[in-house]
Amino acid sequence: MAKVNSTALGQEPIGKLLIKQSLPASIGILVMSLNILVDTIFVGNWIGPTAIAAINVVLPVSFFIAALGMAIGIGGSSIISRALGANDSSKALKTFGNQITLIIVLCITLVILGLTFIEQLIPAFGGKGEIYAPAEIYYRIVLYGVPILALSMMGNTVIRAEGKPKFAMIAMILPSIVNLIADYFLINVLDLGMAGAAWATTGSYVICFLYVLWFFLSKNSELKLQSAHFRLDLPILKEISSLGFVTLARQAVVSITYLLLNNILYNLGGAASVTVYAIIGRMLMFALFPVLGVTQGFLPIAGYNYGANNPSRVRESINKAILYAGVLALVVFAIIMIFPESIVAIFTTDKTILAETPSAMRWVFAALPIISLQLIGSAYFQAVGKATPALLLTLTRQGFFFIPLILILPKYYGELGVWISFPLADVISTIVTGIFLNKEIRKNLVPKTALPIEE
């Protein structure tokens, strides 16, 4: 694999660069999403539909701790991209070292707390009745591997910040392949049930970490750490925290929505309704892969060129990222609207789930074609180090609009109120993001013009 220097982020044509950065990210997210989908299919067919609901209950807790790694990764990577753009390698190295130290301390602490309060957390996230026992088995095993996942996710964002998306793609593909193979042997061949599914997932985290570790120890990385770089630096920690808090807040709100939705749906329709949401949630992860890939590819381009004081390239990257992501979202939208019954049939043969899920899925994905503006808009502010607007825009959909909607509408419309809350929140948050982004472009991303020649 040819060695690529980060300076390419400031030199190559934006369209070509965006494709080069986004395609590996999209492939990586696609494989990871397929892994989650197939994992759910295996669990649903080999263990049962209740097992799907059990995994859905555990996800908010494990995802939140893993998101801590992503938060520190994206927050630090924003600094690293801008530092590399400004030729400040010292700050890039200090930032990377501080990211590693911070993740190790925080994640181990959270895992200890997560295991201590297991009996309170699982029921709080909807793991009640028949769902509790399989959820507890899965939770205990997966939680041990979450700090390793957090380190891997942080490392993946730094790899991308260096302008090496192909390596980041491989880091996402490897654990997905391992997980699927391990699922087959541990669940289907050895008949280990939920424990087998959990150990397969944890083992995949370890493989991902080993690959990321190899990358940074090899000649492929520009970031060669020394012991001094791991010493916590307060100004860098503050910058990582302020920018990373955007991602962490997003995942915290996602975890809260999982908690609320699992409980609301369980009260409305029991375990079957929780399973319907679990299947739709997997499809959300999968269907958004091209849009999320463009967003991931956009981040280092915007950050590097902002750090290099090149507003015209930043503005162009925004416009093209929204265009590319929007077209891809429209294609996915069409597939979801036309084939929801066939999609649901892949996960289960349960007649109740097959009857209820397609209609709900259509509602949840109704506003998909416009979501690219919301994602790229909030990602821009994070990429250029503007933590406050990034945080506010990130929280608009899930926090400011979606949570109030799911607390109010189900009282009047039952389960339908839950499903229509999704597109309503998407539309409102996209409008708000568009207003903020347009104002930012007009104010701070005005293309440079040549000075008039004096006669």
Image (cartoon, helix red, strand yellow):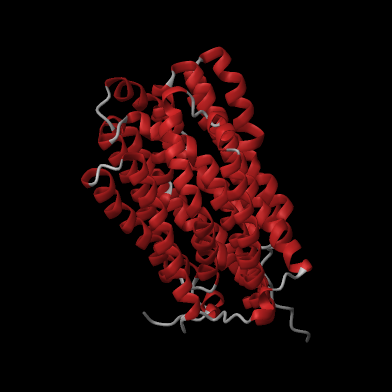
Residue 49 in percent (x, y) is at: 33, 30
Count of numbered badges drawn on the protein: 0
Comparing 313 with 403, the one in front is 403
Asked if residue 334 lies left or right of residue 415, the reply is left
**Above or below: residue 91 compared with residue 258:** below
Q: Who's the residue at 39% across and 30% down the image?
A: 361
Residue 165 can be seen, yes or no: no
Q: Who's the residue at 56% across and 37% down the image?
A: 118
Question: Which quadrant of the view contains residue 151?
Answer: bottom right
Question: Which quadrant of the view contains residue 29?
Answer: bottom left
**Above or below: residue 333 compared with residue 179:** above
Looking at the image, the residue that sits furthest to the top is: 412
Looking at the image, the residue that sits furthest to the bottom is: 455
Comparing 16 with 30, the one in front is 30
Residue 38 can be seen, yes or no: yes
Residue 296 in percent (x, y) is at: 51, 59
Q: State the quadrant of the C terminus.
A: bottom right
Residue 329 in percent (x, y) is at: 42, 46
Q: State the quadrant of the N terminus.
A: bottom left
Residue 223 in percent (x, y) is at: 57, 79
Q: Who's the residue at 61% across and 51% down the image?
A: 247
**Above or below: residue 121 compared with residue 383:** above
**Above or below: residue 190 compared with residue 427:** below
Asked if residue 223 lies left or right of residue 219, the reply is right
Asked if residue 399 lies left or right of residue 418, the reply is right
Comparing 143 with 214, the one in front is 143
Looking at the image, the residue that sits furthest to the front is: 116
Q: Who's the residue at 46% across and 65% down the image?
A: 209
